[in-house]
Image (cartoon, rainbow, N blue to C red):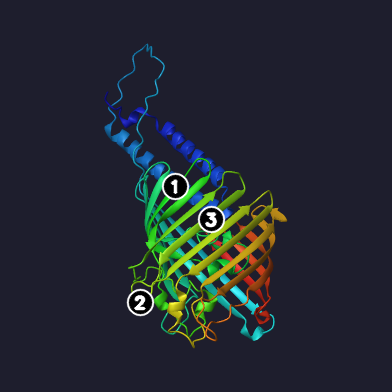
Amino acid sequence: MTSQPLRAMPSKTLLAASLAACFAFATSSAFAQTATEAELARKLDQLAAELAAVKAQLVQIQQQRAATAPAAAPAPAVVTAAAPVAVPVAPAPAAPATVLTSYGELNYNRPTRANQNAQADVRRFVLGYQHRFDDKTKVVTELEVEHAVSSAGDPGEVEVEQAYVERQLTPTWAMRAGLFLMPVGLLNENHEPTAFYGVERNFVETAIIPSTWREGGVQFVGNFNNGLTLQGGITTSFDLNKWDATSGEGKESPLGSIHQELALAKSHDLALFGAANWRGIPGLLLGGSIFTGQATQAQAVEKARITLWDLHARWTPGRWDLSALYTRATISNTAALNATLVGNPTLIPKSFDGYYVQGAYKVWSHEDYALSPFVRWEQFNTARAYADLGPGLTPDAARAERVVTLGANLQVSPGVVVKADYQRFREAPDQNRVNLGLGWSF
């Protein structure tokens, strides 16, 4: 059976079918994932790009029709025609499409007991793009600048936050290869300022989970009709040889001080990871993740394994937004690694953990505006325990820090947010502070 020419299907029918497909995809995706407003905005951007590609394809088809259509013959005086029969036409490959993305944060922090240390900062400025080569293949990239200026004498950094290619293998499974964000916790993959409450990212998902944490490797992503998303793969790992026992960086974030970010990353030791998130009930997200891998990179006599896992939940009934997370990490064989570091202020901890609970409520909304007060209580300990080094040599476990954050997010539009909050520290009250922030994402 020969295929019918493209002109057999009216252009209006093709456009209507394309629009219907986009609408069905958006509706099913929103129900299955119950995404946040930031996630929905990102999906709408992608749908807009795909719709633009369909329109471009339609123009091309119309041009082909105009070039190949034969001259119209004079109509006979009497015409008896059968009802038109719809002939299915195989869809043409999607035209290339590119979507520009960006987010940024400008923050102001003022300690209440040491206001001479108040500071303002362009915390982050990110530009990215997603380019779709065809209906199954796309590339995702992001370039980030921190603290406005990056040079040898300035505190800023320029870094590639994401750079991976994704290929849809089946309707359920896709594969990613390159530099990607690890699917850990609630914040790491969804860290735009419009996606979280408070001026600063929470401590548990920065001090324990080193958001934004990315690794290079291969990842498989499965999205199932029951609302379950599975992710897993093999990636680069941490480098314990970067541990600086003379500084306090390891106390602030043990894993943050030894991550490699695919910058000439040592890759003798690789890691495995897996994550599961279920969104089978509208408004509810339940999930967890695990990461494990050797981390001495054949540079030390002793081997050590880093393992981190988390459990998290988010529920958004009506105007409420409730979430909770617990995470714990361990480093094996730290007694042998610390033997040569004894006498320095910051040894390698054996374990560290943290958790938080958070509640927000949308008290007012009008047109694009929405005001959501929130409160967050979190506890974290970056040195929960040390391996035994013998009497007088083993450091004492650190005291867990407890932080209460009380504030509000004011959405100015779906992509712009103004924030204000107050943070109170239990163990370090000198850090109590007032924060103001401005953020955007598209």
Front residue of this view, candidates 106 and 79: 106
Give the label, 3 or 1, closer to the camera. 3
Q: Is residue 106 above or below residue 431?
A: above
Which sits earlier in the primary sequence, circle 1 or circle 2?
1
Label 2 Cα crowd, 10 Å radius (few <14 / some 14-19 / many 20+): few
Secondary structure type for disc 1: strand
Most extreme residue toward the right is: 363
Which sits earlier in the primary sequence, circle 3 or circle 2?
3
Most extreme residue toward the bottom is: 343
Q: CA distance from mark 3 to mark 2?
A: 33 Å
Q: CA distance from mark 3 to mark 1?
A: 15 Å
3 and 2 marks in contact (CB < 8 Å): no
Label 3 Cα crowd, 10 Å radius (few <14 / some 14-19 / many 20+): many
| Residue identifier under label 2 | 301
Front residue of this view, candidates 225 and 193: 225
Q: Is residue 313 left or right of residue 147?
A: right
Residue type indicated by callout 3: Gly
Q: Is residue 215 above or below residue 425?
A: above
Label 1 Cα crowd, 10 Å radius (few <14 / some 14-19 / many 20+): some
1 and 2 marks in contact (CB < 8 Å): no
Q: CA distance from mark 1 to mark 2?
A: 39 Å
Q: Which mark is residue 288?
A: 3
Please tell me in which quadrant of the rendered image residue 409 appears: bottom right
Q: Which mark is residue 222?
A: 1
Q: Position of residue 89 (x, y in %)?
A: 35, 30
Q: Position of residue 118 (x, y in %)?
A: 62, 81
Q: Residue at the location (57% across, 59% down)? A: 195
Secondary structure type for disc 2: loop
Query: On the rendered image, what quadrant is the N terminus found in?
Result: top left
